[in-house]
Amino acid sequence: MKIFHLSAECYPLAKVGGLADVVGALPKYQNQLGCDSMVIMPFYNTKYTQNNTFEEVFSGRIHLGSHLVDFQILNLKSDDLGFEVFCVHIPELLYRTDVYCNDDSFRFMAFQVAALDWIKQMQNLPDIIHCHDHHSGIVPFMMSHSFVYERLRYIPSVLTIHNGQYQGWTGMETASLIPHFKADRLGFLIWRNMINPLASAIKCAWKVTTVSPSYMQELMYKANGLEDLLRHESAKCVGILNGIDTSVWNPKDDGNLMKTYTARTSASGKQANKEFLCKEFNLNPEKPLVAFIGRLVGEKAADLLPYACDFGLETTDANILILGSGDPQVEYQLNALKEKHHGRYNAFIGYDEKLSHLIYAGADFLLMPSRVEPCGLNQMYALRYGTVPVVNRVGGLKDTVVDFSLEHGFGVTFDNASVADIVNAIQRCMYFYSEEKRFKANQKTMMGIDHSWDKSAQDYLDLYTSLKQN
Ligand code: ADP
């Protein structure tokens, strides 16, 4: 089965968050199941694209309203990823160091039209076109309604919602950029008086998936304005839990670590990484280390972190380490805490992939107080590295973490994104940590939990097969 994934991000070419990790792994696991799965994404100016070779396989010219835009399709010349990557190269629009900018409606429209123009002339058309988030949300509409893409009309399209908060809203004038379609189809693009690419994809895709079952249920009641639409389309909606790429995220041979380890050697391996981290960040390796990794935004409840860290440090013995960037006010507050809790708290404001691996390995606890978490990968990485996830029970966090007070439990959970709940959870972490024997045994248990892509990749394949049979 030939599958095209259309996405704004794909690890390791360009990553802002979990979307990149998923699109950078799912095709590889689909290929292991015998598919021919590949990625189409914009060609950005990133370290990876600078340091790798690409070959032009197609060139064309698209009309975006009155604009004429030339594009090339570049094929990544590497076998390392386990799947093929094709990049849409439009230097003036897409070749930037940032994935997301303030003219994204136009940029991603150009990306989508160019991608479909390339696909439509192929001799072997794909069996499935799989769109990820709103950046490729107009594709299902164009496949169904634009005259120039008539050839693609019977190819099933799938939308995966990685994050329903962002929908790509844009003004009505954007409709004029879309290749010609009947005027009475305009309604498929619109939701609440705006062109809404995510809503359009929910209406037009053959199937809609989200990245965890609980997130799908939550979206029916809380989806940043799309609740009614999702309830209306619920018959074609399904939640499939993300997996993690266990070849990239593996403490056994992770080149980013100070010391690699397995479940058997987890105690000494984790301690060596913790000591290195603590030295780097002036923390005490004898104390329990609670870490946070992520975007400093409201969805992750980052605004609560400065207060929760402050009270948590005042009321417990914990050390706390933060890695993240985002809201400047939160960044400022997190930096300001360094002085007050010198030697017990530190924060690295920025994005650092290597450091994130080290923290998953060296921390004892990974805090995720998210208000919204469609799937969440961090808690699965934490488990894989023997680090206790400490999570607010929403979305995928609810589906993957069981509190240590329950039968077969291994994590720490709470029920509200509030300062009081986070501080209480940190206090419970200290209690868990003090039960040394159980805590160490739990590290091994967590490392044995299987969140690899194998099952989810099969679930997606079953879904595609059901569409092909219709
Ligand atoms: P989201 O996509 O909402 O940001 P996910 O949990 O799905 O959240 O994925 C987050 C991914 O981004 C993880 O791989 C995490 O390690 C990584 N990440 C987030 N912030 C940083 C950072 N500042 N430095 C390094 N990696 C980060």
Image (cartoon, rainbow, N blue to C red):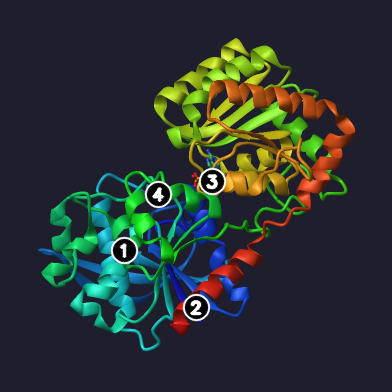
Q: Position of residue 443 (x, y in %)?
A: 80, 42
- Return the disc, 4 or 2, that comes first in the chain's sequence: 4
Name the residue at 70% across, 43% down: 402
Determine if residue 169 is in view: yes
**Which circle's residue, 1 or 4, is located before the other in the chain?**
4
Which residue bears the numbered disc 4?
164
- As measured in the structure, the alpha-carbon distance from the residue carrying label 4 to the one carrying label 2 is 25 Å
Q: CA distance from mark 3 to mark 4?
A: 12 Å
The residue under the point 49% across, 51% down is 217
Nearer the observer: mark 1 or 4; the answer is: 1
Nearest-to-viewer mark from 4 and 2:
2
CB under 8 Å between discs 1 and 4: no
- Label 4 close to label 2 by CB (< 8 Å): no
Which element is circle 3 on?
helix
SS label for mark 4: loop
Separation of marks 1 and 3 at Cα, in angstroms: 23 Å
Cβ atoms at labels 2 and 1 below 8 Å apart: no
Q: Can you identify the residue that label 3 sits on?
A: 395
> In the displayed image of the protein, which residue is found farthest to the bottom?
123
Density class for disc 4 (Cα within 10 Å; few <14, some 14-19, many ≥20) is: many
How packed mark 3 is, by other alpha carbons closer than 10 Å (few <14, some 14-19, many 20 or more), is many
The percent coordinates of residue 427 (x first, y second) are 70, 22
Looking at mark 3, is its residue's CB closer than 8 Å to ligand 1?
no
Sooner in the amino-acid sequence: mark 3 or mark 4: 4
Which residue position holds label 1?
203
According to the image, label 2 marks what residue? 466
Q: Amino acid at mark 2?
A: Ser
- Amino acid at circle 4: Gly
Q: Is residue 301 above or below residue 27?
A: above
- Closest to the observer, 319 or 354: 319
